[in-house]
Every structure is written in structure tokens, then in C-alpha cells.
Image (cartoon, rainbow, N blue to C red):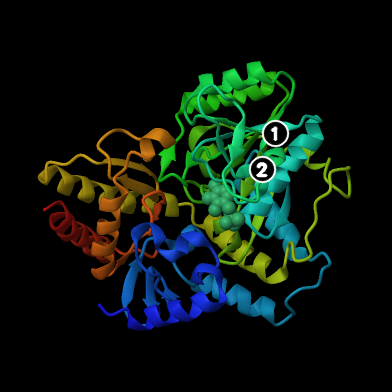
Amino acid sequence: MNFDKSKRLFEEANKVIPGGVNSPVRAFKSVNGTPLFITKGEGAKMIDADGNEFIDYIGSWGPHLFGHNPLFIKNALTEALENGTSFGAPTETEIKMAQLVIELVPSVEMVRMVNSGTEATMSAIRLARGYTGKPKFIKFEGCYHGHADYFLIKAGSGALTLGVPNSPGVTEGNAKDTLVARYNDIDSVYDLFDKNKDEIAAIIVEPIGGNMGVVPAKKEFLQALRKLCDEQNCVLIFDEVMTGFRVAKGGAQEVYGINADLTTFGKIIGGGLPVGAFGGKKEIMETLAPVGPVYQAGTLSGNPLAMAAGVAALTHIKNNPDIYSELEEKASWLENAFKENLNQQNKNFAMNRVGSMSCMFFTETEVTNFDDAVKSDTKLYADYFHGMLKRGIYLAPSQFEAMFISTAHSNEMLEKTANAHYETMKEILG
Ligand SMILES: *Cc1c(COP(=O)(O)O)cnc(C)c1O
């Protein structure tokens, strides 16, 4: 396989775009490579600038539940385009969009549209603070909630419960109201509540972690968070930017049977266009401007093209509830094929999967939190990644990302993937 044109384009891109990319993980840095420039996506396949064809398991990092460019989204976009690209005024499609989200996700009574997952989570935190009148919030190590300053915080060392900035440009002032607990460890949360009495506005959590590889929360853990938030007048925020409409039509909260107070969305909700949303209890949502005092706004929020794509995606989900059992079947087939092969090679790497999102960690021990995940052999993952790539399988260029299956992945493609996996593992494990 030849990547010459992509390599040339990457050199050119590096002169005018920092690192050649508009989002860091695309740069293939953690697998020690250079990114492929993509020219076309269709169904589960992607074609790069050199004309190589791949079976794609990134799906634009989550949005493509039905593969690339499905006809029903393309048609909706073409139709909307006829009438103009943006009005900065309300449209009927926005009502339809809100109604669909509310219908599919039972805990959501009202919803506000934004333009990315980052905007959704930062707005949800502001809203929770405004609603409760309290300054601090808890996040979990290894969970990702976009790149707002007060999320780019990691746990302080040792007994320190205060978070510390994770990136230059984030101030200690930003860090001081972010408390960091351990995922799946409820005692670490109780501890923070003890030390920050009546100061915690919200707990934000990925109910299925998808940004440290895939790490599902334990049900008792989420139940305990729910109970704690009820007792402490604290807003429980499920960040379902990745899991929303991915693991079930009602997201992870449907899988676990636990309702959040606020939920954030992104990725699938936009049908491939830049969309985010946050929604939840009416009483909380109505503290937002212009009804209430908590300010939040967006020039292109609820954009007609984005809403047309989003409505098409959510309508398809609503009308085809069977897609989730179909995805489960496909994903479990592939998981079993991978596991069988690992057995043959006398290896037992940790594998986590919920529906169509999964991750194989290059570590033998179970992965239930960030500390477990980072035990993975990332060098071995890089070898695996390149072995799969040259066999036509496009995986995330990092150990700590999910592998996504779409409804466009055919059984034949899954078999081809399993074979590529066998050959690659034989090659890299010797
Ligand atoms: C992707 C993601 C975000 C950020 O969304 P952007 O659209 O990239 O800003 C936030 N939270 C979770 C759980 C995500 O997976």
C-alpha cells in the first residue's frame, strides 16, 4: 500500500495548520505515523488521497452510526440547501429536532441545540452552577468532556483532592473548582463531598467511558451517583456525546435504567454535521436565557442544514428500532472472532464492549478505570494499528479510543477484518 500523496499533503498541511491537523488525535502521533488524507467515504468504506480503500472503524469518531453519507441524510441535506444555509431565526425543523430528542431520551424534557460536544458540556456545567448556586463540580479521571478550560484538569498527586491543569493555558483559577475522582470508585466521590460540603453543583460522567478506550461504568456506581446527587442537591450530568443514540436509542441511560438530570449530546445527533445539544429536566432548563438568568447563545445554533441532517438521523433511529440488535449481533461476532484468535495465541488481552463500541486493550488485566487503561502496551498497539492499516482496516490511531461498528458494515467486511486481525496478531506477537 502506497501513502505517497497523503505524505506530501501532510507536509504541505504542516506549513499552514499547526501539526497539519485541525484536531490532535488525527495526526497519528501516538502510533508514530502520518495521517491519511481522505477523499471519500461511502457506507463503511473510506478512500484516501492515494486511492487506497479501507474498512472504517472510526466513523468520524462516532457520528456515522449508519456509515458514511447514507442516502436519507444526503436527501435531507439537499432539500434543506435549496432554502438557504442559515437564518439566525427560529425554524420549524428545530422544533422537530427537539421533539425527537425528547421522545427518544425519556429523561430529557427540554433541549437546547449547540454546535459541538464541547459547547454542550461547558453549557451544562454553567447551567448546573447557575441552577444550584454552587461553584464546584466533579469529573472522573479518564473521562473526556471536550476542551473547555475547566475540563482539562487531572487529579492532583497523593492526598491532594484539588485538580491541576492538564495543559498550558489553563490557569490554577480554572482548576480550583474542578474536583477529580476515580471512575468506578464511589468512595473517591464520597471523599470529595466530605471535603467540599455544600459546594458541589454537579457530577459529570461518561456513563460508558469512551475516551480512555471503552470502559463501562458499573451499574452500582452510577446508581450511587444518582442517589448522592438526589441527597446533595447536585445536578447529575451524563455526558452522552459518544453514547447517545449509539448504545441504544435512549443512550447509556436506557441501558442502565438510570435517569440523568442533564444530558449532553454530540456526534450522532448531527448526522455528520457539527451539532451538539444539552437537555434535561424542565425546571433546570428553564433557568437558561431568555427564560432565566443563565446566559448561553450561538450564532449558528440550530442551523437549518445541521438540523435537517440531525432530524434525518434521529427519524431513521426512531423508525428502525431493530438497528441496535443488528449492531449488537455484528459487534459480538467480531469480538468473539478476536477473542478466539487471542486464545489460539495464548494471549488474553482485556476487551471491553457495549453494543457497537468496543476496545481491545493491550494489557492482560481487566480495565475498569483510567489507571488500568494506561497499563496498556501502546507500542504494541501502534504495531497492531499499522498492521491492520496495511491490510485495509482503518482503526483509531490511539489505544485509548473506541472502535465503532455501523449498520453499513457487512458480514463480509467483518470477516475480512477478523482475518486481518489474525494475520496482524501473528505478525506482531511473533
Ligand atoms: C467527543 C466528545 C466530546 C467533545 O465533543 P466535540 O464535538 O469534539 O467538542 C465530549 N464528551 C464526550 C464523551 C465525547 O466523546
Estimate how packed mark 1 is, as few (under 14), some (14 to 19) or many (20 or more) residues with alpha carbons within 10 Å. Answer: some
Work out which quarter of the rendered image holds the N terminus and state it.
Answer: bottom left
Residue 365 seen in the figure: yes
Q: Residue at x 37, y 34 (%)?
A: 372
Q: Position of residue 13 (x, y in %)?
A: 50, 77
In the picture of the structure, the residue carrying the numbered disc 2 is 150
Q: Quadrant of residue 67?
A: bottom left
> Badges 1 and 2: C-beta atoms under 8 Å apart?
yes
User: Type of residue at label 1?
Assistant: Asp
Q: Quadrant of residue 404?
A: bottom left
In the picture of the structure, the residue carrying the numbered disc 1 is 177
- Relative placement, left or right, of 302 versus 267 is right
Q: Residue at x 49, y 73 (%)?
A: 69
Which residue is at the front of the view, 357 or 320? 357
Q: Position of residue 289 (x, y in %)?
A: 86, 48
Q: Quadrant of residue 216?
A: top left
User: Type of residue at label 2?
Assistant: Tyr
Query: How many angstroms separate mark 1 from mark 2 (CA)?
Result: 8 Å
Q: Position of residue 331 (x, y in %)?
A: 33, 51
Residue 39 seen in the figure: no
159 is higher (above) or lower (below) than 116: above
Q: Position of residue 120 (x, y in %)?
A: 67, 50
- Relative placement, left or right, of 387 versus 25 is left
Q: Residue at x 49, y 57 (%)?
A: 320
- Relative placement, left or right, of 159 versus 232 is left
